[in-house]
Image: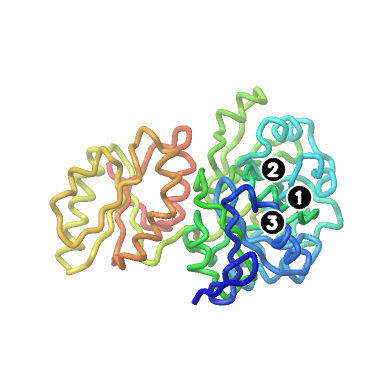
Amino acid sequence: MKAVFGLAIIVDGTLVFNARDPVVLEEKAVAAAELLRQGKLVAFPTETVYGLGASVRDERAVSRIFEVKGRPVDNPLIVHLSDISELPGLARNIPAEAWTLARRFWPGPLTLVLEKKPWVPGVVTGGLDSVAVRVPDHPVALALLRAAELPVAAPSANISGRPSPTTADHVLADLAGRISAVLDGGPCDIGVESTVLDVRGGCLRILRPGSITPQEIAGLLQRKCEIVELSADKNPPSPGLKYRHYAPRAPLYLFLGEPGKVTVKMQEELETWLSRGKKAGLLVTLESAKAFSGYRNVELIVPGSRDDPAAMAARLYAALREFDARRVDVILAEGCSPKGAGLALLNRLQKAAGENIVQVE
């Protein structure tokens, strides 16, 4: 149900500020920032996905994030700042390499894991002595953070485990009536979460791959960084390491291997599901799409070419939500190479699949 209220419309009890017009952006950001200062939850766009924000200084508000999302309390949150100059307020013993990275990639989709200042609440950090921090590269996010004049903890603005939201409509589909407001800044450009890099103690460990690649980081710092595999650590230092994420409602099977062999195996599996009377969703590259064009009772989504994994990543979550809308019984997804931007895409597909990974020999 929609209703008009001042600067916003109301959707099932949640204020929705249309922040796409730069002329009115500041006015609406100020209104949303006031809600943050009052201890309310506000969703906002970043260049990666929509985040669900609460003031880091308000432990009760941060706790509400976990309640609303159904998020495990040991899964740490990322703190969003409006400027690099605010970093020393949250972190201590900041390595020189962290400053080099921040100056190069902020604002942008890089999150740094650092030693936290004692005042940063444990509810934000999953009880750890580290804090994950970034400066987002989105005009709406930056306007909100500047107006709020406080650090904002913000995981993705969705029910925990579901595909992350890349539009305001995705946020409302999951959280309308559960949060105070959404700043609608249009679709997110990158579409997958930020690269998370642990730089404590002289290490360089990618805890979650994103659009900033290991090669870019290594090239800047002139040394290699480690990539942490999917983990079941008891106390993960980063979001996305421990729990199943990004999952559509139907089970997703991910097929990995040489593209031609993957296509043949997917056709075999598809025919098995169809013979059982199931409605199947297919997530395949442009190069493989023709092989599946003749099937009935199949929902085919082609996010892009395998030569452009960044474009496919940008469309991934919307595609998974579209399969939900089309009520498929199962999803068969083509994998990708882990090179460059493909690393982040493959990571999200693996998380969405859980244990349903088919390695085609």
Residue 312 placement (x, y as % from top left): 40, 43
Placement of 186 over or under 8, stated as above or below? above
Is residue 65 shown left or right of residue 276?
A: right
Which disc number belongs to residue 112? Answer: 2
Task: Point out the tag, 3 or 1, that comes first from the N-terminus.
Answer: 3
Instruction: State the separation of the CA atoms marked 3 and 2.
Output: 26 Å
Residue 212 placement (x, y as % from top left): 57, 36
Instruction: State the separation of the CA atoms marked 3 and 1.
Output: 9 Å
SS under mark 2: strand
Judge by depth and name the residue closer to the eye, 97 or 54: 54
Which disc number belongs to residue 146? Answer: 1
Q: Are marks 3 and 1 in contact (CB under 8 Å)?
A: yes
Label 2 neighbourhood size at 10 Å, few (<14), some (14-19), many (20+)?
many
Placement of 177 over or under 165, stated as above or below? below
Quadrant of the image occupied by residue 335: top left
Label 3 neighbourhood size at 10 Å, few (<14), some (14-19), many (20+)?
many
SS under mark 1: helix
SS under mark 3: helix
| Amino acid at circle 1 | Arg
Residue 174 placement (x, y as % from top left): 51, 68
| Amino acid at circle 3 | Ala
Instruction: State the separation of the CA atoms marked 2 and 1.
Output: 20 Å
**Mark 3 lies on residue:** 29
Q: Are marks 2 and 1 in contact (CB under 8 Å)?
A: no
